[in-house]
Amino acid sequence: MTAQTILPANSVRGGDLVTNSCRFNAPDDAYMHKTPSSDGSRRIGTFSIWVKLALNTSEGQYLFSGSPDATTETSLGLSIDGDDLRFNGWTGNSQHMLLVTDRKFRDPSAWYHIVVAWDTTQGTASNRVKIYVNGVQETSFSTETYPNQNRDLNINNASNKTLIGARSTANYAFADGYYSEVVMIDGTALTPTSFGEFDSDTPTVWKPIDVSGLTFGTNGFYLDFEDSSNLGNDKSGGTDLTESNLAATDQSTDTCVNNFATMNPLTQSEPGNSPTFAENNLKITMTNFDTESVMATMGVKKGKWYWEVKGGWKTSNWGFGIEKASSSNVGFSVGYTATSYSFSQNGYKQNASSASQIDSGLSDGDIIGYALDLDNGHFNFSQNGVWYNGSATESTTFNTSTHDFTSLDFGSEFVMPTISGFGDSAITTEINFGNPSFTISSGNADANDHGNFEYEVPSGYFALCTKNLAEYGG
Protein backbone atom coordinates (compact mmCIF):
# COMPACT_ATOMS: atom_id res chain seq x y z
CA MET A 1 0.00 0.00 0.00
CA THR A 2 1.28 3.47 -0.87
CA ALA A 3 2.11 5.51 2.20
CA GLN A 4 -0.06 8.56 2.61
CA THR A 5 -0.28 11.42 5.05
CA ILE A 6 -2.61 14.27 5.84
CA LEU A 7 -2.12 17.15 8.28
CA PRO A 8 0.16 18.22 9.83
CA ALA A 9 2.32 17.29 6.85
CA ASN A 10 0.14 19.10 4.31
CA SER A 11 -0.33 22.16 6.45
CA VAL A 12 0.02 24.68 3.64
CA ARG A 13 -1.73 22.66 0.94
CA GLY A 14 -5.27 23.51 -0.04
CA GLY A 15 -4.86 27.24 0.67
CA ASP A 16 -8.08 28.74 1.98
CA LEU A 17 -10.31 26.21 0.24
CA VAL A 18 -11.62 24.97 3.61
CA THR A 19 -12.17 27.70 6.19
CA ASN A 20 -14.22 26.06 8.94
CA SER A 21 -15.03 22.92 10.85
CA CYS A 22 -17.59 22.07 13.52
CA ARG A 23 -16.54 21.03 17.02
CA PHE A 24 -18.67 18.11 18.28
CA ASN A 25 -18.32 17.62 22.04
CA ALA A 26 -19.54 14.19 23.17
CA PRO A 27 -20.45 15.28 26.75
CA ASP A 28 -22.88 17.78 25.21
CA ASP A 29 -24.70 15.05 23.21
CA ALA A 30 -24.10 17.18 20.12
CA TYR A 31 -25.24 16.01 16.69
CA MET A 32 -27.15 17.02 13.53
CA HIS A 33 -30.07 15.32 11.83
CA LYS A 34 -32.73 15.46 9.14
CA THR A 35 -35.37 13.17 7.68
CA PRO A 36 -35.57 13.10 3.86
CA SER A 37 -38.87 14.28 2.40
CA SER A 38 -38.77 11.70 -0.41
CA ASP A 39 -36.97 8.50 -1.34
CA GLY A 40 -33.60 8.45 -3.04
CA SER A 41 -31.34 5.50 -3.71
CA ARG A 42 -31.09 2.90 -0.98
CA ARG A 43 -28.54 0.83 -2.87
CA ILE A 44 -25.95 3.33 -4.10
CA GLY A 45 -24.32 6.25 -2.28
CA THR A 46 -21.18 7.83 -0.82
CA PHE A 47 -20.26 9.52 2.45
CA SER A 48 -17.13 11.68 2.79
CA ILE A 49 -15.77 13.42 5.90
CA TRP A 50 -12.58 15.08 7.07
CA VAL A 51 -12.27 14.50 10.81
CA LYS A 52 -9.90 15.16 13.71
CA LEU A 53 -10.82 12.81 16.54
CA ALA A 54 -10.73 13.68 20.24
CA LEU A 55 -10.92 9.98 21.27
CA ASN A 56 -12.61 10.69 24.60
CA THR A 57 -15.78 8.64 24.31
CA SER A 58 -16.07 5.17 25.85
CA GLU A 59 -19.07 4.06 23.76
CA GLY A 60 -17.58 4.79 20.35
CA GLN A 61 -18.71 7.59 18.08
CA TYR A 62 -20.79 7.56 14.92
CA LEU A 63 -19.62 9.76 12.07
CA PHE A 64 -23.00 9.29 10.43
CA SER A 65 -25.95 6.90 10.68
CA GLY A 66 -29.44 6.22 9.40
CA SER A 67 -32.42 4.48 10.99
CA PRO A 68 -36.24 4.53 10.82
CA ASP A 69 -36.64 5.46 14.49
CA ALA A 70 -35.04 5.39 17.90
CA THR A 71 -36.58 2.11 19.05
CA THR A 72 -35.34 -0.48 16.52
CA GLU A 73 -31.92 -1.85 15.66
CA THR A 74 -32.54 -1.36 11.93
CA SER A 75 -29.73 0.99 10.94
CA LEU A 76 -26.74 1.88 8.83
CA GLY A 77 -23.69 3.50 10.40
CA LEU A 78 -20.05 4.51 10.04
CA SER A 79 -18.31 4.72 13.39
CA ILE A 80 -15.05 4.78 15.30
CA ASP A 81 -15.39 2.07 17.96
CA GLY A 82 -12.35 1.78 20.15
CA ASP A 83 -9.52 2.27 17.68
CA ASP A 84 -11.37 0.70 14.73
CA LEU A 85 -13.31 2.17 11.83
CA ARG A 86 -16.57 0.25 11.32
CA PHE A 87 -19.27 0.31 8.66
CA ASN A 88 -22.28 -1.74 9.68
CA GLY A 89 -25.84 -2.48 8.72
CA TRP A 90 -28.66 -4.02 10.76
CA THR A 91 -32.23 -5.12 10.07
CA GLY A 92 -34.03 -5.77 13.32
CA ASN A 93 -31.56 -7.75 15.44
CA SER A 94 -29.85 -9.25 12.41
CA GLN A 95 -26.58 -7.75 11.21
CA HIS A 96 -26.31 -8.01 7.44
CA MET A 97 -23.06 -6.04 6.98
CA LEU A 98 -19.91 -5.34 9.02
CA LEU A 99 -16.52 -4.09 7.89
CA VAL A 100 -13.90 -3.44 10.58
CA THR A 101 -10.54 -2.05 9.48
CA ASP A 102 -7.24 -3.38 10.73
CA ARG A 103 -6.01 0.20 10.58
CA LYS A 104 -6.17 1.86 14.00
CA PHE A 105 -7.35 5.42 14.59
CA ARG A 106 -5.46 6.59 17.66
CA ASP A 107 -4.05 10.00 16.77
CA PRO A 108 -5.87 13.01 18.31
CA SER A 109 -3.53 15.44 16.53
CA ALA A 110 -4.15 14.41 12.90
CA TRP A 111 -6.88 15.06 10.37
CA TYR A 112 -8.18 11.98 8.53
CA HIS A 113 -10.17 11.90 5.31
CA ILE A 114 -12.62 8.98 5.34
CA VAL A 115 -14.79 7.97 2.38
CA VAL A 116 -17.22 5.05 2.28
CA ALA A 117 -18.95 4.20 -1.01
CA TRP A 118 -21.64 1.55 -1.41
CA ASP A 119 -23.27 -0.07 -4.42
CA THR A 120 -25.15 -3.23 -3.55
CA THR A 121 -26.03 -3.85 -7.21
CA GLN A 122 -22.49 -5.09 -7.82
CA GLY A 123 -22.10 -8.82 -8.54
CA THR A 124 -18.78 -9.11 -6.66
CA ALA A 125 -19.33 -8.87 -2.91
CA SER A 126 -16.17 -6.86 -2.17
CA ASN A 127 -17.25 -4.22 -4.71
CA ARG A 128 -20.47 -3.49 -2.83
CA VAL A 129 -18.72 -1.44 -0.13
CA LYS A 130 -15.38 0.36 -0.39
CA ILE A 131 -13.67 2.33 2.35
CA TYR A 132 -10.88 4.84 1.71
CA VAL A 133 -8.63 6.67 4.17
CA ASN A 134 -6.52 9.63 2.99
CA GLY A 135 -7.06 8.72 -0.64
CA VAL A 136 -6.16 5.02 -0.43
CA GLN A 137 -8.59 2.09 -0.33
CA GLU A 138 -8.63 -0.04 2.81
CA THR A 139 -8.11 -3.70 1.95
CA SER A 140 -7.22 -5.19 5.33
CA PHE A 141 -10.12 -5.96 7.66
CA SER A 142 -10.46 -7.89 10.91
CA THR A 143 -14.12 -8.46 10.00
CA GLU A 144 -15.34 -8.40 6.39
CA THR A 145 -19.03 -9.15 5.85
CA TYR A 146 -20.63 -7.55 2.79
CA PRO A 147 -24.36 -7.03 2.15
CA ASN A 148 -26.23 -9.30 -0.22
CA GLN A 149 -26.58 -8.17 -3.82
CA ASN A 150 -29.33 -5.56 -4.35
CA ARG A 151 -29.98 -5.15 -0.63
CA ASP A 152 -31.70 -1.90 0.33
CA LEU A 153 -29.67 -0.13 3.02
CA ASN A 154 -31.20 2.05 5.72
CA ILE A 155 -30.29 5.41 4.24
CA ASN A 156 -31.68 7.96 1.75
CA ASN A 157 -35.34 7.09 2.15
CA ALA A 158 -38.22 9.13 3.48
CA SER A 159 -38.82 6.96 6.56
CA ASN A 160 -35.22 7.07 7.77
CA LYS A 161 -33.63 9.73 9.90
CA THR A 162 -30.04 10.65 8.91
CA LEU A 163 -27.70 11.81 11.66
CA ILE A 164 -24.23 13.32 11.68
CA GLY A 165 -22.38 12.62 14.90
CA ALA A 166 -24.68 10.11 16.63
CA ARG A 167 -26.28 6.68 16.30
CA SER A 168 -29.81 6.92 15.00
CA THR A 169 -31.22 3.95 16.84
CA ALA A 170 -30.78 5.47 20.28
CA ASN A 171 -29.20 8.92 19.79
CA TYR A 172 -26.00 7.88 21.52
CA ALA A 173 -22.36 7.19 20.61
CA PHE A 174 -22.04 10.92 20.05
CA ALA A 175 -19.24 12.47 18.02
CA ASP A 176 -16.15 13.77 19.75
CA GLY A 177 -13.94 15.71 17.38
CA TYR A 178 -13.76 18.27 14.60
CA TYR A 179 -15.74 17.57 11.41
CA SER A 180 -15.00 19.38 8.14
CA GLU A 181 -16.28 19.16 4.55
CA VAL A 182 -19.03 16.60 5.28
CA VAL A 183 -20.64 15.29 2.08
CA MET A 184 -23.44 12.78 1.47
CA ILE A 185 -24.03 11.60 -2.11
CA ASP A 186 -27.33 9.93 -2.97
CA GLY A 187 -27.26 7.63 -6.02
CA THR A 188 -23.56 7.56 -6.97
CA ALA A 189 -20.67 5.51 -5.57
CA LEU A 190 -17.66 7.83 -5.85
CA THR A 191 -13.94 7.39 -5.30
CA PRO A 192 -11.95 9.72 -3.03
CA THR A 193 -10.66 11.70 -6.03
CA SER A 194 -14.06 13.41 -6.08
CA PHE A 195 -13.16 14.97 -2.72
CA GLY A 196 -9.37 15.20 -2.61
CA GLU A 197 -6.10 14.75 -4.47
CA PHE A 198 -2.45 13.99 -3.85
CA ASP A 199 -0.25 17.05 -3.82
CA SER A 200 1.83 17.48 -6.98
CA ASP A 201 4.91 18.62 -5.03
CA THR A 202 4.61 16.01 -2.27
CA PRO A 203 2.85 12.98 -3.81
CA THR A 204 2.22 11.25 -0.46
CA VAL A 205 0.24 14.22 0.90
CA TRP A 206 -3.55 14.09 0.50
CA LYS A 207 -5.46 17.40 0.35
CA PRO A 208 -9.07 18.55 -0.23
CA ILE A 209 -10.46 19.87 -3.51
CA ASP A 210 -13.57 21.88 -4.36
CA VAL A 211 -16.65 19.65 -4.02
CA SER A 212 -19.33 22.24 -4.79
CA GLY A 213 -19.80 20.97 -8.35
CA LEU A 214 -20.66 17.39 -7.39
CA THR A 215 -24.07 15.88 -8.10
CA PHE A 216 -25.48 15.32 -4.62
CA GLY A 217 -28.68 13.50 -5.59
CA THR A 218 -32.14 13.56 -4.03
CA ASN A 219 -31.09 13.36 -0.39
CA GLY A 220 -27.41 14.30 -0.59
CA PHE A 221 -25.97 17.29 1.24
CA TYR A 222 -22.79 19.30 1.78
CA LEU A 223 -21.84 20.83 5.14
CA ASP A 224 -19.06 23.44 5.09
CA PHE A 225 -19.86 24.95 8.55
CA GLU A 226 -19.16 28.48 7.35
CA ASP A 227 -22.33 29.95 8.88
CA SER A 228 -21.94 29.96 12.67
CA SER A 229 -25.63 30.82 13.09
CA ASN A 230 -26.65 27.81 10.98
CA LEU A 231 -24.01 25.12 11.25
CA GLY A 232 -26.35 22.60 9.60
CA ASN A 233 -26.64 24.67 6.44
CA ASP A 234 -26.71 22.45 3.34
CA LYS A 235 -24.41 24.27 0.92
CA SER A 236 -25.70 22.13 -1.96
CA GLY A 237 -29.10 23.80 -1.70
CA GLY A 238 -31.06 21.01 -0.04
CA THR A 239 -32.88 21.00 3.28
CA ASP A 240 -30.65 22.07 6.15
CA LEU A 241 -29.78 19.68 8.95
CA THR A 242 -31.12 20.49 12.41
CA GLU A 243 -28.47 21.12 15.07
CA SER A 244 -28.85 19.60 18.52
CA ASN A 245 -26.71 20.90 21.39
CA LEU A 246 -24.45 22.86 19.05
CA ALA A 247 -23.73 26.60 19.34
CA ALA A 248 -21.97 29.31 17.36
CA THR A 249 -18.87 28.74 19.52
CA ASP A 250 -18.65 25.24 18.02
CA GLN A 251 -17.63 26.73 14.69
CA SER A 252 -13.87 26.40 14.38
CA THR A 253 -11.04 27.34 12.03
CA ASP A 254 -9.20 24.14 12.96
CA THR A 255 -9.50 22.39 9.59
CA CYS A 256 -7.95 19.86 7.24
CA VAL A 257 -5.89 22.68 5.68
CA ASN A 258 -4.83 24.39 8.93
CA ASN A 259 -4.49 22.15 11.95
CA PHE A 260 -4.40 23.87 15.38
CA ALA A 261 -2.81 22.51 18.54
CA THR A 262 -4.93 20.92 21.26
CA MET A 263 -3.92 19.05 24.39
CA ASN A 264 -3.02 15.41 23.85
CA PRO A 265 -4.55 12.74 26.15
CA LEU A 266 -1.92 10.24 24.96
CA THR A 267 0.81 12.24 26.75
CA GLN A 268 -0.60 11.87 30.26
CA SER A 269 2.35 11.33 32.57
CA GLU A 270 0.29 9.09 34.87
CA PRO A 271 -2.71 7.80 32.87
CA GLY A 272 -4.16 6.01 35.88
CA ASN A 273 -5.17 9.36 37.29
CA SER A 274 -7.56 9.78 34.34
CA PRO A 275 -8.16 13.50 33.83
CA THR A 276 -11.39 14.28 32.01
CA PHE A 277 -11.00 15.83 28.56
CA ALA A 278 -13.77 17.76 26.83
CA GLU A 279 -14.29 20.29 24.03
CA ASN A 280 -11.98 18.29 21.79
CA ASN A 281 -9.14 18.23 24.32
CA LEU A 282 -9.22 21.97 25.03
CA LYS A 283 -10.96 21.64 28.42
CA ILE A 284 -9.35 19.51 31.13
CA THR A 285 -10.64 18.59 34.57
CA MET A 286 -8.40 16.87 37.10
CA THR A 287 -9.82 15.47 40.35
CA ASN A 288 -8.25 13.47 43.21
CA PHE A 289 -4.81 12.90 41.72
CA ASP A 290 -1.21 12.97 42.83
CA THR A 291 0.71 14.77 40.10
CA GLU A 292 -0.42 14.69 36.49
CA SER A 293 0.94 16.39 33.38
CA VAL A 294 -0.41 16.56 29.82
CA MET A 295 1.38 17.99 26.78
CA ALA A 296 -0.02 19.64 23.67
CA THR A 297 -0.23 17.99 20.25
CA MET A 298 2.37 20.31 18.71
CA GLY A 299 5.88 21.29 19.69
CA VAL A 300 8.29 23.93 18.42
CA LYS A 301 12.04 24.42 18.16
CA LYS A 302 12.09 28.06 17.11
CA GLY A 303 9.82 31.03 16.50
CA LYS A 304 7.51 33.12 18.66
CA TRP A 305 4.19 31.69 19.87
CA TYR A 306 1.15 32.89 21.81
CA TRP A 307 -1.73 31.12 23.55
CA GLU A 308 -4.21 31.76 26.38
CA VAL A 309 -5.47 29.76 29.38
CA LYS A 310 -8.67 30.33 31.33
CA GLY A 311 -9.53 28.54 34.56
CA GLY A 312 -9.63 28.28 38.33
CA TRP A 313 -6.60 29.96 39.84
CA LYS A 314 -6.98 30.63 43.55
CA THR A 315 -8.45 27.33 44.70
CA SER A 316 -6.30 24.81 42.87
CA ASN A 317 -2.75 23.59 42.52
CA TRP A 318 -1.93 23.64 38.85
CA GLY A 319 0.38 25.23 36.36
CA PHE A 320 0.61 25.79 32.64
CA GLY A 321 3.88 26.29 30.84
CA ILE A 322 6.38 24.53 28.63
CA GLU A 323 8.33 21.29 28.89
CA LYS A 324 11.03 19.65 26.82
CA ALA A 325 9.29 17.05 24.66
CA SER A 326 11.60 14.21 25.69
CA SER A 327 10.80 14.68 29.40
CA SER A 328 8.40 12.19 30.93
CA ASN A 329 7.67 14.52 33.87
CA VAL A 330 6.22 11.57 35.81
CA GLY A 331 5.57 12.63 39.39
CA PHE A 332 6.49 16.27 38.78
CA SER A 333 4.53 19.39 37.92
CA VAL A 334 5.50 21.54 34.96
CA GLY A 335 8.00 24.08 36.21
CA TYR A 336 9.41 21.74 38.82
CA THR A 337 12.13 20.22 36.65
CA ALA A 338 15.11 21.99 35.08
CA THR A 339 13.67 21.56 31.58
CA SER A 340 10.23 23.04 32.31
CA TYR A 341 8.88 26.53 33.03
CA SER A 342 5.45 27.58 34.20
CA PHE A 343 3.16 30.28 35.50
CA SER A 344 0.92 28.62 38.06
CA GLN A 345 -1.53 28.97 40.89
CA ASN A 346 -1.52 32.11 43.03
CA GLY A 347 0.62 33.94 40.50
CA TYR A 348 3.90 32.02 40.77
CA LYS A 349 6.44 31.51 38.03
CA GLN A 350 8.47 28.35 38.49
CA ASN A 351 11.49 26.52 37.09
CA ALA A 352 13.65 23.75 38.54
CA SER A 353 11.49 23.73 41.72
CA SER A 354 12.34 27.39 42.31
CA ALA A 355 9.20 29.57 42.47
CA SER A 356 8.67 33.29 42.83
CA GLN A 357 5.38 35.13 43.13
CA ILE A 358 4.81 37.84 40.52
CA ASP A 359 1.07 38.36 41.11
CA SER A 360 -1.10 37.71 44.15
CA GLY A 361 -4.30 39.06 42.66
CA LEU A 362 -5.42 36.24 40.34
CA SER A 363 -9.13 35.42 40.27
CA ASP A 364 -11.02 32.43 38.94
CA GLY A 365 -11.87 33.03 35.30
CA ASP A 366 -8.85 35.21 34.62
CA ILE A 367 -7.27 34.65 31.21
CA ILE A 368 -3.52 34.25 31.32
CA GLY A 369 -1.54 34.91 28.15
CA TYR A 370 1.65 33.00 27.37
CA ALA A 371 4.26 34.39 24.95
CA LEU A 372 7.09 32.00 24.09
CA ASP A 373 10.09 33.36 22.16
CA LEU A 374 12.44 30.52 21.28
CA ASP A 375 14.54 32.70 19.00
CA ASN A 376 15.72 34.80 21.94
CA GLY A 377 15.03 32.42 24.83
CA HIS A 378 12.22 34.32 26.58
CA PHE A 379 8.94 33.22 28.16
CA ASN A 380 6.44 35.87 29.28
CA PHE A 381 3.00 36.03 30.92
CA SER A 382 0.01 38.36 31.03
CA GLN A 383 -3.12 38.62 33.18
CA ASN A 384 -6.25 39.70 31.29
CA GLY A 385 -4.14 41.44 28.67
CA VAL A 386 -1.69 43.15 31.07
CA TRP A 387 1.86 41.84 30.74
CA TYR A 388 4.08 41.23 33.74
CA ASN A 389 6.81 43.63 32.70
CA GLY A 390 7.30 45.35 36.02
CA SER A 391 5.12 48.36 35.19
CA ALA A 392 1.61 46.82 35.40
CA THR A 393 0.68 48.23 32.00
CA GLU A 394 -0.46 46.67 28.76
CA SER A 395 2.95 47.27 27.22
CA THR A 396 4.51 44.24 25.56
CA THR A 397 8.01 45.24 26.64
CA PHE A 398 9.40 41.89 27.67
CA ASN A 399 12.56 40.43 29.15
CA THR A 400 12.47 41.90 32.65
CA SER A 401 13.80 38.77 34.31
CA THR A 402 12.07 39.48 37.62
CA HIS A 403 8.71 38.87 36.00
CA ASP A 404 9.46 36.40 33.21
CA PHE A 405 12.01 33.82 32.10
CA THR A 406 15.08 34.67 30.03
CA SER A 407 18.03 32.77 28.59
CA LEU A 408 16.02 29.63 27.82
CA ASP A 409 18.01 27.15 25.76
CA PHE A 410 16.50 23.84 24.67
CA GLY A 411 19.12 23.14 21.99
CA SER A 412 17.59 21.10 19.17
CA GLU A 413 14.79 19.72 21.37
CA PHE A 414 11.10 20.31 20.68
CA VAL A 415 9.31 22.35 23.35
CA MET A 416 5.71 21.45 24.24
CA PRO A 417 3.01 23.54 25.94
CA THR A 418 2.19 21.53 29.07
CA ILE A 419 -0.40 21.58 31.85
CA SER A 420 -0.08 19.86 35.22
CA GLY A 421 -1.79 19.69 38.57
CA PHE A 422 -1.62 18.06 41.97
CA GLY A 423 -3.85 17.69 45.01
CA ASP A 424 -7.37 16.50 45.77
CA SER A 425 -9.42 19.51 44.65
CA ALA A 426 -11.09 19.64 41.26
CA ILE A 427 -9.22 21.66 38.65
CA THR A 428 -10.79 22.75 35.37
CA THR A 429 -8.94 24.76 32.77
CA GLU A 430 -9.63 25.73 29.16
CA ILE A 431 -6.78 26.24 26.74
CA ASN A 432 -7.02 28.50 23.69
CA PHE A 433 -4.43 27.92 20.98
CA GLY A 434 -6.57 30.00 18.62
CA ASN A 435 -9.85 28.05 18.56
CA PRO A 436 -11.41 28.71 21.97
CA SER A 437 -13.98 26.46 23.60
CA PHE A 438 -15.22 29.46 25.59
CA THR A 439 -16.87 32.67 24.39
CA ILE A 440 -14.51 35.39 23.22
CA SER A 441 -15.84 38.91 23.80
CA SER A 442 -13.34 40.76 21.63
CA GLY A 443 -11.61 38.62 19.01
CA ASN A 444 -7.97 39.03 18.08
CA ALA A 445 -6.00 37.15 15.43
CA ASP A 446 -2.26 37.03 14.88
CA ALA A 447 -0.54 38.96 12.07
CA ASN A 448 -1.29 36.10 9.65
CA ASP A 449 -4.99 36.34 10.56
CA HIS A 450 -4.93 32.97 12.31
CA GLY A 451 -6.57 32.30 15.66
CA ASN A 452 -9.24 33.91 17.82
CA PHE A 453 -7.95 35.26 21.13
CA GLU A 454 -9.46 37.40 23.86
CA TYR A 455 -6.47 39.73 23.99
CA GLU A 456 -4.13 41.28 21.44
CA VAL A 457 -1.43 38.95 20.18
CA PRO A 458 2.01 40.51 20.80
CA SER A 459 3.73 41.78 17.66
CA GLY A 460 5.75 39.03 15.98
CA TYR A 461 4.04 36.20 17.87
CA PHE A 462 1.74 33.63 16.25
CA ALA A 463 -0.93 31.03 16.98
CA LEU A 464 0.24 27.43 17.22
CA CYS A 465 -1.16 26.00 13.96
CA THR A 466 0.36 24.18 11.02
CA LYS A 467 0.27 27.11 8.60
CA ASN A 468 2.31 29.17 11.05
CA LEU A 469 4.55 26.22 11.87
CA ALA A 470 5.36 25.79 8.20
CA GLU A 471 6.49 29.41 8.07
CA TYR A 472 8.11 30.00 11.46
CA GLY A 473 8.43 26.68 13.32
CA GLY A 474 10.90 23.88 13.18
Image (cartoon, grey):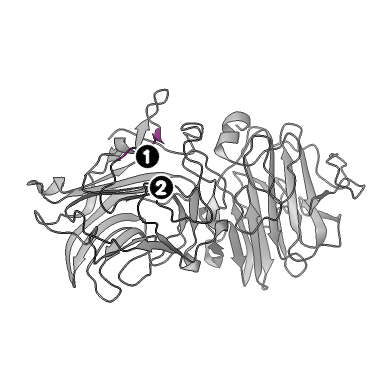
Verify CB contact (< 8 Å) between mark 1 and mark 2. yes
Relative side of 89 to 111, left or right: left
Quick check: 471 above or below 326?
above
Quick check: 120 above or below 246?
above
> From which residue to which does the magenta span run?
206-214
Picture coordinates of residue 91 (x, y %)?
17, 68
Task: Tell me the residue that label 1 is attached to.
Answer: 212
Relative side of 40 to 5, left or right: left
Which image quarter: residue 395? top right
What secondary structure predominates along the stretch shown in magenta? loop
> What residue do we see at 26% from left, 44% from top?
138
Task: Tell me the residue that label 2 is attached to.
Answer: 235
Picture coordinates of residue 341 (x, y %)?
73, 48
- Pick the quarter of the image with the C terminus: top right
> What residue do we see at 46% from left, 68% from top?
29
Amino acid type of the residue that numbered disc 2 sits on in the rendered structure: Lys
Quick check: 265 above or below 434?
below
